[in-house]
Amino acid sequence: MPLVLITGAGSGIGRASALALARAGWTVLAGVRRPEDGEALREAGGPAVEPLLLDVTDEEQVRAAAETVRRRAGERGLQGLVNNAGIAAAGPVELIPEAVWRQQLEVNVVGVVAVTRALLPALRQGRGRIVLMGSVSGLVSLPFMGPYSASKFALEALADALRIELAPWGIAVSLIEPGSVVTPIWTRSAEAAQGYLLPPPPGTEAVYPAAVAAMTRIAQRNARQGLPPEAVARAVVHALTAPRPRARYLVAAPERAREVRLLRWLPTGLRDRLVLATVRRMLGRGAGQGPGAPGRARG
Ligand SMILES: NC(=O)c1ccc[n+]([C@@H]2O[C@H](COP(=O)([O-])OP(=O)(O)OC[C@H]3O[C@@H](n4cnc5c(N)ncnc54)[C@H](OP(=O)(O)O)[C@@H]3O)[C@@H](O)[C@H]2O)c1
């Protein structure tokens, strides 16, 4: 049976991917941060799912996971790595402390690099494939999602570099770019923001609180609407099993996918105006209130 390691498999997309891969005949090393999540996953997925404790920001746990893979895989090496673990820090850039920025990039970017580097010897040995969990937020950056978008834009760059660097060993690299998916990430994000957002400095009270309220509403909506995590898991399975895996998988409702493609290619000034209109619509307020018109940018 082919062997895959998935990070952040305790919930949401990671959990759905672990179960889908187990059903597809893979042995799944499922990275979780709490033993009880591992037990629940094993109960749902059966003996093909082997939980392991893996916080991607913990050097010792990353090293131990690589050792487990080495022992478990032996000469056959590792056939798949799914870098899925992620968090979403949200809010106005000015109100997010540097420590939160560091944590965002540490988990979503440095953690991906650390796990990938640690497992590359086993992947090379097993002629494995790598999947990175990007986002449409890595294609179009929305206001008040700065840290999260920055992390997902970084993954776009990382995927492009890795794909070519690892081609000599036949290690395919795929980036999944989901739109909204119904998982706990959005409520977690909104709850965490309550704890770290700084008070708005003088002169910003007319803008930031309304923006934060809109952001919370968007998070609540995303927590309810969107694709099921199984839709993303299907792309993960395709990336690991198809004879010709794709470099990118945009997984979103058709209208959302069209919107993202359009926003990505519009001149910047026009894109800013469309994004602003969307934010205002979500704020449920008329023009002239909430976030002000952006400075004219040339695309
Ligand atoms: N949901 C969406 O709409 C959406 C859209 C595009 C992309 N994505 C991406 O999909 C991935 C999975 O997110 P999700 O939506 O499934 O949310 P989720 O249910 O919150 O899953 C995130 C997982 O990452 C784990 N995690 C967080 N910090 C970690 C760390 N330091 N080390 C190891 N694991 C860690 C979490 O573990 P704990 O439970 O222990 O915290 C959790 O299992 C993320 O990369 C996210 O950015 C999600």
Image (tube, rainbow, N blue to C red):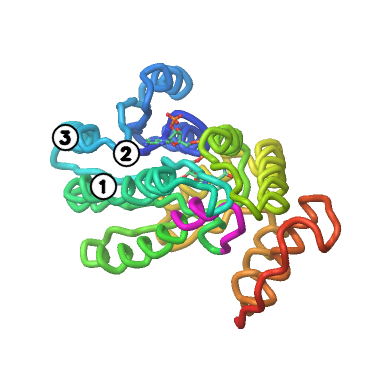
Q: Identify the image quadrant of the N terminus.
A: top left
Task: Evaluate if marks 1 and 2 touch, with contact meaning CB atoms under 8 Å apart.
Answer: yes
Q: Which residue is drawn at 51% across and 59% down?
A: 138
Q: Disc 1 to disc 2, how far (Cα)?
A: 7 Å
Disc 1 residue type (three-letter):
Ala
Asked if the stretch drawn in magenta spans residue 148, the answer is yes
Q: Give residue 13's position: percent from left, percent from top.
A: 51, 39
Residue that mark 1 sits on: 114
The residue pinned by badge 3 equals: 67
Residue named by callout 2: 56
Ligand 1 within 8 Å of disc 2? The answer is: yes
Residue 277 image offset from top left, x and y in percent: 76, 63
Sequence-wise first label, 1 or 3: 3
Query: Badge 2, how many Cα within 10 Å: few under 14, some, many 20+?
Result: many
Residue range corresponding to the magenta coloring: 140-151
What is the number of the mark on residue 230? none
- Label 2 vs 3, first from the N-terminus: 2
- Separation of disc 1 and disc 3 at Cα? 14 Å
Q: Does the magenta stretch include residue 249?
A: no
Q: Which residue is drawn at 55% across and 41% down?
A: 197
Q: Tell me if residue 14 comes above or below residue 292 in the rendering.
A: above
